[in-house]
Amino acid sequence: MTRSTTTAAALGAHARVRTRKLNTRTNLAILRQEDLQDLDDEAQRNVPRIDTGIEKAEESEHHLQAALSASNAAAIGGKVAQIYIPTPDAVPSSIDYEKLYPLMYKQPQSYIRFSSTVEDVAGCPYNMDEEDDAFLKSMNKKKNASTQCSEVVFEEVMNCFEETAQSQQPWAAVDSPPVISYDIIEETMDDYLDYSQKRFTKEIYEHWKTRRLESGNKSLIQNLKFETGADTDDADPYVCFRRREVRQIRKTRGRDAHSAEKLKKLRKELEESRELLAMIKQRELHKREQLEVEKQLFEQRTNLRQIKQNLPDQYKQGDEDILINQKPKKKPLEITQRMPNIQIPRRTDGRSAETDLLLLSEWHAEREREISEAIEEKIRQHEKWNEGFVDLTKAPLTPPSETAIGSTFRTATTEYFLPTPPASVSSEHSGDGGMDFGAVNLNKAESIAVRYASPSYDGPCHSQPSFRRRYGRGGRLLIDRRGMRMSQKENMDTAIADRYKYDDEDDEDDVPRYYVDPFDTESMVFRSRILPGQPTQAQMQAMRAQRDAAIAAAQAASHGNPSMRSARQPGSEG
Amino acid sequence: MAPRDGSQERTGTPDTVEKGMATINTLRIGVKAFVEKDGEKRKAEILSIQTKKGQPNYYVHYEEFNKRLDEWVPASRLDLSQEVEWPQPEAPTKKAQKSTAPAPKSAPLPKQTAGQKRPRPSTTAGTSRKGSETPELSTTTGNAAKPARPPLVGGKENRPGSDGSISVVAPELSTDTPKGEESEMDIVDIQDAAAAAKASNPQHQAPFSREEEIEKLRTGGSMTQNQTEISRVRNLGHIQMGAFEMEPWYFSPYPSTFTEADTVYICEFCLSYFDSNQTFTRHRAKCTLLHPPGNEIYRDNSVSFFEIDGRRQRRWCRNLCLLSKLFLDHKTLYYDVDPFLFYCMTTRDEHGCHLVGYFSKEKESAEGYNVACILTLPQYQRKGYGKLLIAFSYELSKREGKLGSPEKPLSDLGLLGYRAYWAETVTDVLLDHEKNSKDGKGSGEISVEEIGALSAMTTNDVLHTLQNLNMLRYSKGQHVIVLTEAVLETKEKAKAKEKAKGLTRRKIEPERLMWKPPVFTASSRTWNW
């Protein structure tokens, strides 16, 4: 944008008649030439040309200028033939194209996807030249037709020499060592050549050696010049494809750990695949052994048969058994017993069709399993939704025990909607509710509860105020609250507990009392969750806040504020 | 066409040029003489000299002609009846600096990392003047030698007193050092190192010319070869590729031994190169590649496009770059191909997918270029493929949701190709817009940026095009865009031409492009080897 405006500015500045700057964002009318009456060509003439983008030194070139001025003239309306820049022409070649490029291509229906590299598809990288050809011919002349060396084999062998030389003497170009000896090549030959190719190596080596000596032990394959690290590299126009300077990646501990992790994983995977391969090798070895044994067996049997034929008087009944492989006895098939009329087709994968058939009992079992799974799933869901509630019933779906009901809630049989929908309440409920226990909480504002991550124990606990939302008959929303000012009296039998039930002014020395801070995040979360009009998404945040609060509380507790009494929270998982 | 005298002004050299008569024996590199070219006498600079069968041949660059027309000429085409211009010796101050800092090699590099092009001389004066960087007698010892060549871009001028005879090329430059035999021995022409490579066939070396004598002397205490100098001379003779033969236009760093070959054979599919028919034929017997080694991303009735990652297909892309360097002057092969994607256009038949042209594109261009280098191979030029390539590059930009522009500098052919495409595209956009507004859609007005957005062209390129076509006018106190008669006529002509040929215009059809802008991780961009 800046560039374009400056250009536009230049447009205006140089014009003889001062014209307004061209704004590239304003709309310009598109007109035909005949629509224009007062064409202000003067303003246009003196406009400097925008940079063409080619090198200044070349801009003045004769043919380019001719072509440009021709097109300029054409733009103004002149009649000029289009001018081409002369280039050396390409001419049809005299090579035998059809032979060199056979008709092999069939276009696939879909777009081609291809990832093989040139190295993959170009075959042996060594290509024999005229000199090699002459040598090969003279070499083959001495041999009879069956032992001649083919061009392909020759190239493989030469390539083996070249590559070995390259790997053994990577700096041959710089420090010019002697031509690598045959013995050294022989060591690595197995990697490149197979048995049939090795017959020619000795002869070809001599040829190769002479050629290397001629060329000053340089590679016979013409290579591009890459950088050698010498100072002359920079000026040498033949040195190409240098590597670029690698931008340093900032080193952080996280990145280190990350790459270490990656490396470990890679290593592990490599290790595994190596083991796999080793095991495959083992298996194949076993197979071979087995084959050998079988072969032996066969031979022994042949012998035995021979002996039998030779000595018929020694013939014994039952000896045939050892002459053939005993098939393992077939197990009686259940399926055939039950449905003898049905021909069971063999499956392609070799399993018997029997496996596909269902028995009634199996079907029942399956069904039962599904049902119980569904139930369990429901239970799990239910537990999840009721998470954080103090559930007096030990198992959520069993009827609550008598004592539990008696101690807290009115005996009202409430129907749980299963599954309970997450807190999404219609608008009619919003606004009301929540004040009564809010008031209660305010009353208790002076008491402080501390909660830390102590392990919960099994018994019911009433120190934590709890709220529960449920739907009554006719869809009424009920909020149950509980435990607002209850103190826990441990190790008391029910009768004594009853006695002190409404006795709040109990002396605090005897019985530990657990107070709950109404502004404790957790209890606020409880309340907020049952409030109507709470968006469901808020639940997630609440859960998070709950966890945070738990951690904070745990920290507070560990700091050891002695005035605070520990409060236990059943049902919370810290 | 006589050479203009104003050329010195253009190159910014006010000094007078040393002129004088010359003989065959006094000609040397850097001399500008008149050479016959297509029946005309044109001023040309001698870039290299070699002797073939006892006769000297001169590699000349015609002034104001593109380098691709440089050629070898026999002495008979040189017009020595006219005065020649002698090369200008180096300014001493400059040399002194240069000799103390032998290679300001890092200077051109940062610029080059951006793209695949050689930097413009303005940004890297150092590179183009490397001819003068060679150490001088005064500051370096023994093996130092003096280039007889003037800087490439500077004007040619000699100081008074330099009589221009070959034996004393630059005595006045090294006035503080002993002259005479020694300095004569040290006369060196760096630039004909390439020529030497080409001319070093043993059979040609029997008759010694003076130049070869100098050459011999040179090889004793050689110094760094000079990139710009050598690469000014084409190094390959003929190229055989597919069913065609062609002449290369520029230098390309194929293996240096290839300069000796009459023909360099290039496999049409894997683009491997061979200096003999035998090796090439053997290769063809083994090579199984039938199309560029990447994914096809576009296919219509006539062409296919392949996308190739320079990092994954290093060998192929290097081969491609070497090949295209033969025809692209401003391409640089200084750095490797990793950070580029190559989009290759092919035509298909039963032989395979024949490479027609390609463009390379940076995986991430800091300057918003959508093309780094673009080339239609010579055997397919002037068939409309170039425009198709350009159109495809803009189609990719549209898919990316970016405005694009080709990397600069453009070549002469590149500029013309782009201008033609831009003109056509902008005209089409305007005509469409005009038509829409007549149909009651749209306002009939359009801003420059809007044109850019519709065509994925940068605002600058749109302005450039409008201006070139004389479409941006000023009327009644405001700017307007005029669909001139010339533009409409060109459009009609093009249409008529297509009809006459019975062809529908080759177009890129966006719905056939199966391509998503590739995303590269930081590591694949930075970790380059």
Image (spheres, coloured by chain):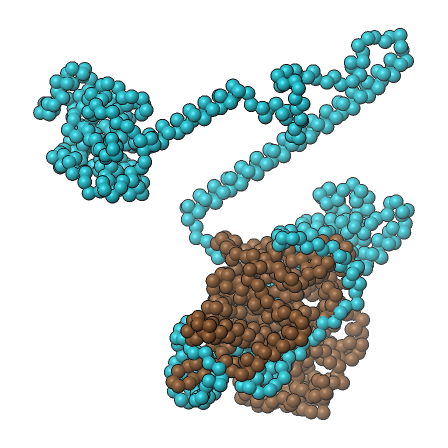
Chain colours: A cyan, B brown
Q: Residue at x 66, y 16 (%)?
A: A331
Quarter occupied by the N terminus of chain A: bottom left
* Residue A506: percent from left, percent from top: 10, 23
Q: Residue at x 64, y 74 (%)?
A: B498
Residue A29 visible somewhere in the drawing: yes
* Residue B388: percent from left, percent from top: 60, 68
Q: Is residue B220 left or right of residue A132?
A: left
Rendered image quadrant of residue A70: bottom right
Q: Residue at x 59, y 26 (%)?
A: A356
Q: Residue at x 48, y 21 (%)?
A: A365
Quarter occupied by the C terminus of chain A: top left
Q: Is residue A187 left or right of residue A383?
A: right
Closer to the camera, A511 or B400?
B400
Indicate whether A153 appears above or below B230: above
Closer to the camera, A67 or A391?
A391
* Residue A379: percent from left, percent from top: 36, 28
Q: Is residue B20 left or right of residue B402?
A: right
Indicate whether A333 appears above or below B9: above
